[in-house]
Image (cartoon, grey):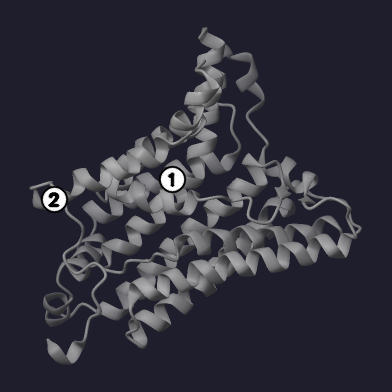
């Protein structure tokens, strides 16, 4: 591949990996509190459709689309939808002590159904002949790039050719890593995830940290769904169009050994594997094998994680376990 082709490949890998980065960062924060939220794919789906609903009614309000509001309204709707879904998960697993695995899977099933129902309803409102919804004016605001990026050649293509949500994902991951490792809040959160009984005895409010971490993580993950629709897909919503990215985001959490900084590299690596088949010449008979690479790597990661010996590379000790204060 020539230089321009390499630059195009890297930029597309970044776009493909950004939803995974949002999902992985959100799940890392959640899992650091001891909550295993397998509802992340559903939360990403609800975050996407919530932003689409807000953007749809604003775009079709009859008034001129103002770029600031075109970004703000879907963004707030996305965060609200993701927050409410995360609160539902917290209420069931923390307050009612429901099984985290079952609850997460139920949230994912609910999220996909919720998105498809309201997505289909909006398409019917438009009386469209095509099975998708287009928010081109809203997407244009999300995809606004640096004006000077196009004048900087390959460097501009690789680093300065994206909408603001790509850079926001990296900033959130870096800040999350700093907070988890370098602040008192991060120390308390990790203590809750490792041994909630000891944290509780030390005066740390276990339920408060679990609620906050899970809700903040859910909202961050929801932004991944919004990015996929508004930026990567150019404002096009189609039912079941999000694919399995939510599950890959959860796999990236393990791949990055629960470190937000490493999740940046991991997400873009998976993004590159996702699109690799478009850039290499192989016989058609072998093409499915190339397309399977992200999932093969996921299996290898899971196997590799199971044989790691270092404690710092292991998940939080109480991950997925319900905390009963009376047993302290």
Q: Position of residue 301 (x, y in %)?
A: 27, 43
Spatial CA distance of label 2 from label 1 is 21 Å
The answer to whether 104 appears left or right of 74 in the picture is left
Residue 214 visible? The answer is yes
Depth check, front residue: 210 or 282: 282
Relative to residue 147, is residue 16 drawn left or right?
Answer: left
Task: Report the disc number at residue 21.
Answer: 1
Q: How many marks?
A: 2
Residue 129 spot, x, y in % from top left: 89, 52
User: Horizontal and vertical percent for residue 212?
Assistant: 38, 71
Q: Residue at x 72, y 62 (%)?
A: 119
Q: Is residue 203 left or right of residue 9?
A: left
Which residue is nearer to you in this view: 115 or 173? 115
Q: Residue at x 71, y 52 (%)?
A: 237
The label number, if any, that marks residue 312 in the structure image: 2
- Tell me the quarter of the picture where residue 157 sits: top right
């Amino acid at each position: 591949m020539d230089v321009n082709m390499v630059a195009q490949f890297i930029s597309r890998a970044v776009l493909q990996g950004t939803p995974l980065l949002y999902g992985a960062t959100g799940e890392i924060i959640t899992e650091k509190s001891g909550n295993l939220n397998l509802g992340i794919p559903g939360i990403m789906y609800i975050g996407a459709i919530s932003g689409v609903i807000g953007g749809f009614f604003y775009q079709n309000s009859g008034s001129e689309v103002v770029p600031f509001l075109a970004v703000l309204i879907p963004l707030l709707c996305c965060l609200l939808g993701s927050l409410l879904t995360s609160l539902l998960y917290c209420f069931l697993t923390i307050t009612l002590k429901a099984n985290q695995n079952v609850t997460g899977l139920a949230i994912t099933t609910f999220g996909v159904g919720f998105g498809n129902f309201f997505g289909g309803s909006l398409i019917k409102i438009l009386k469209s002949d095509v099975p998708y919804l287009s928010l081109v004016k809203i997407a244009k605001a999300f995809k606004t790039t640096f004006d000077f990026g196009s004048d900087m050649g390959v460097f501009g293509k690789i680093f300065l050719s994206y909408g603001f949500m790509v850079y926001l994902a990296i900033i959130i991951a870096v800040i999350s890593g700093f907070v988890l490792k370098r602040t008192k809040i991060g120390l308390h959160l990790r203590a809750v995830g490792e041994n909630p009984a000891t944290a509780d005895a030390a005066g740390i409010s276990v339920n408060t940290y679990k609620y906050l971490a899970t809700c903040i993580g859910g909202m961050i993950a929801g932004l991944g769904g919004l990015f996929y629709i508004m930026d990567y897909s150019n404002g096009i919503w189609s039912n079941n169009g999000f694919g399995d990215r939510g599950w890959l985001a959860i796999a990236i959490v393990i791949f990055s050994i629960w470190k937000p900084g490493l999740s940046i590299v991991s997400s873009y690596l998976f993004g590159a594997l996702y699109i690799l088949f478009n850039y290499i010449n192989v016989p058609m008979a072998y093409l499915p094998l190339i397309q399977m690479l992200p999932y093969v790597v996921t299996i290898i990661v899971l196997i590799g994680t199971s044989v790691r010996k270092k404690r710092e590379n292991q998940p939080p000790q109480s991950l997925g376990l319900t905390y009963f204060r009376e047993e302290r």
